[in-house]
Structure formats: structure tokens, C-alpha cells
Image: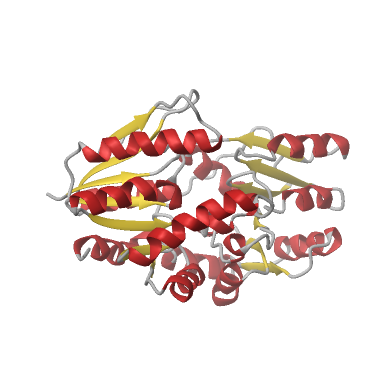
Amino acid sequence: MRKIIVSVTTDLTTDQRVEKVCNTLYKNGFNVTLVGRKLANSSPLKRDYKVKRFQLFFNKTILFFAEYNIRLFFYLMFSKKELLLANDIDTLIPNYLIHKLQRKKLIFDSHELFSEIPELVHRKKVKKFWLSIENWILPNLKNNYTVSNSIANYYFNKYKVSFTTIANYPQKKKYEKTLVSSLRKDEKIIIYQGAVNIGRGLELMIETMSLLNNYRLIIIGEGDVLKSLKKLVALKNLKNKVVFMNKVSPIELSKITPNAHVGISLEEDLGLSYKYALPNKIFDYIQAKVPILVSDLPEMRKIVEEYGVGEILTSREPEILANKIETITTSDYQKKLKLAKQELVWEVQEKKLVAIFKNAQ
């Protein structure tokens, strides 16, 4: 049984992609250890494989990155393993050093274009730091995969390294609709689930709610702009039309999502990371048979055009957005959603994923 250490900087609780990867590897005979961190509010974890969570002194800024990477380096140094899986650039340095020092095979999963995320647009020195890591390590990697064809093409064009696309589809599962107590049966529900960060189009969506009658917006998740969004809702006097549910478990989420009439993914074009994004929430909506409204960005547009499961927002004006939502809620997408639900699942990706690890160079 080949032993693999998987590393990520999150607290592991809601990182569904990493959990799916670990479960797939475990089912296919790998001895998996997942390394992350533990925060003050982190929930307990029960997994079939081993989990290691660092409790850090620092959980923000460069001090967090430095402490986590030093801890990870020494953990990897003195742990038995044959394979290393680094998730995103912020875990790559210690994995790459161990790969070189101990000649262990390294696999890299790029969840996004890390150096192009919107949070770095106006932070030139920080962006330069992450780019320097990319420029140093990525040209030397042989076993890579990422979430979309656009990101894979970007890396190949820039670094001449190949990336396999392993889309972040959800696993097959039954959704059991459970009516949320704070919602009325006669309301039409718009849902957003995921990180509540800059550039997710949530300010625009909140502005648009004043134009929609008998609609309710549910925002599920936590992030950097959550407080400012709550202030905006209060300022616009929309507390009766917007519900914040913060972070919920995947099980609870699967009960809430089927209540929705529209699932939104309205990322702004704030750098290449968002431009090439293919958010997993899109596929969660489809699995719950909820039609989607997405930004006019290449990967998201492709899903809507290929499967016909919703609409594309081509103009970011409240009136246009309101019209698109009303179009979706008065149309029938169920036959196309049923087909897409069968095809856009993690099980379709698993063979490609396992092949990467079994054939790692």
C-alpha cells in the first residue's frame, strides 16, 4: 500500500475537493494522511484515512504562511511516505524541498491561478512573492492537475508544463429537500453558496433584490466581505429579503440547496483566477437540479451553453440581472438538469485522477 501525504492550508472542514481526492485515493489502495490546520472554531473530523492538523500561533499574514510551511517541512521530513500531494502554491515549497532532498514523487493540484486571485490585484509585492514561487518550482514539476482547461492551458503556455484537468464535480448523491424554517413556501429562492469574498457579485445581487418581488436571497458561507454585505443589506432595508446562513456542513447544505429556484455564480473578471474559474458551487446546484445563472466568463459560459441548464449574465446591471432571474424562474430546465446531473459527477473524473498517482514520475 503506497503511502501518500496530502497537504493543504485550510482547516479541512469544508474543503470538498481535497476530501474527494483523499477518498478516491483511499478507495484505490493508497495509505492517505491529510495535513491541514486546526482553528479555534474548527469542527471535529471523522475520516477513513489519517488526519493531522497543526495548531498555529499565527493564522493570518506572512507569519501564518511561514509558520505553517516550516511545520509542514519538518513533518514531511520525518514521516514515512512515497508520494506527496501539494494543494495550491501555498503548500508547494516544503513539498518541493522534500521531493528534492528525499527523492519522493510530487504531485501538484492547482485549485486556482493562485498568483492571479483578486485579493492580490492591488498588492504588487505580495503578488510578486507568489509569482516568484511559481517561476521557481512549476517548470520543474511533472505530475500536475487543475480544475479547468483554461488554467491548464495558461500554465502550459507560460511554463511549458502539462496539467491534466480534473474538474471539481460533486459526487453522486441524493438531495433531500428540507424546507428552511425562515423561508416561506410561496417565495422564490435565489441561493449563493461558497466563499463570501471580494468579486463574487454579491453586492450586485443585493442591489438587485429591491427590484424583485416575492424573492429571497440566501447567502451561505463566510469570508472577507461578509460584514460589509450585512451592512449593505441593512442600509438598503432588505433584511426581509436577504438571509445570511454563514458556514453550514455539506449534509445540511444538501438539504437547503434544493429549495432554490436559481443558483448564482456571478464572479467578476478581477484577474485570470476568476476569469478561468469553474466554481464547484455550479455543479452542486446542478446536482440539486437548480438552474444556474453565471457570469459571462469562459469556463462557466461553456457549461451553460453545452448543457442548457441556465442563463449567462452578459451585462452587470441590476435591471438586467433581475430580468435574467425572472427568465429562469419562469422556464423549465428540469430535463436538461437531469442529464447534466448524470454526467457532471466526480465518479467520471476518478479514473483520470488515480492514473496520475499510479503513473507519477
- 43 left or right of 105 in image: right
Q: Nearer the viewer, residue 93 or 254?
A: 93
What's the residue at 39%, 39% (across, down)?
Answer: 69
- 292 left or right of 215 in image: left
* Residue 285 visible in the picture: no
* Residue 118 visible in the picture: yes
What's the residue at 43%, 41% (across, down)?
Answer: 9
When asked about the image quadrant of residue 331, the answer is: bottom right
Residue 319 rendering spot, x and y as whole percentages: 86, 61
Q: Nearer the viewer, residue 3 or 127?
A: 127
Above or below for 96 versus 180: below
- 251 left or right of 19 in image: right
Residue 55 rendering spot, x and y as whole percentages: 40, 26
What's the residue at 61%, 50% (across, down)?
Answer: 125
Q: Give the position of the C terminus as an image quadrant.
A: bottom left
What's the residue at 86%, 48% (across, down)?
Answer: 210
- 96 left or right of 331 in image: left
